Image (cartoon, rainbow, N blue to C red):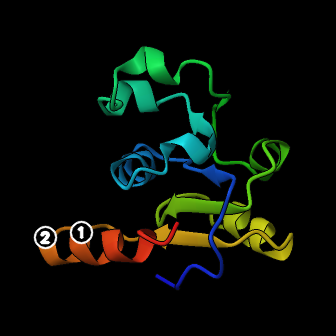
Amino acid sequence: MSPIPKRPVRLLAPSATSFDFLTALGAGDRLVGIPEQVFDYTEPPGGADRWRDLPTFGHYRAEEVLALEPDFVVAHSYQARDTTSLLKRAGIPVVLIPDLTKIEEIRSALRLLDGA
């Protein structure tokens, strides 16, 4: 994972994992959108109703992501590489969370994202 270039204001979490990381770090109030499946794969802090007013999107596709005008995206490494490439070319920093299997990997990811 690469470092965060500046303190972002408009965050996008295109996976339940990135949503969990960003909300655990207290950055949920800066989310501009979340994937529809968040409500199926995680228990959102404060309950699902707290997040229902946020725009949702179906897939990690460049057009859906760009429409939300994020200035920082925290995606999962398995997500569409072409979308990640297009976002980076558009000047939007993207950090990819790898598959995390060890507690130290999770801690490392949290330390990195703590600047978000």
Question: The residue under label 2 is which amino acid type?
Answer: Ile
Seen at 34% across and 20% down, the residue is: 47
Element on which disc 2 rests = helix
Q: Can you say whether 80 is above or below 55 in the image?
A: below
Drawn side of residue 72 relative to residue 77, left or right? right
Between the C-alphas of marks 1 and 2, the distance is 5 Å
Q: Position of residue 89 (x, y in %)?
A: 84, 75
Q: Nearer the viewer, residue 77 or 7?
A: 7
Tell me the residue that label 1 is attached to. 106
In the current view of this chain or complex, which residue is farthest to the top?
A: 49
Seen at 32% across and 67% down, the residue is: 99
Q: Position of residue 65 (x, y in %)?
A: 74, 47
Drawn side of residue 112 relative to residue 64, left or right? left
Element on which disc 1 rests = helix
Drawn side of residue 7 relative to residue 105, left or right? right
Seen at 37% across and 54% down, the residue is: 21
Mark 1 vs 2: CB contact within 8 A: yes
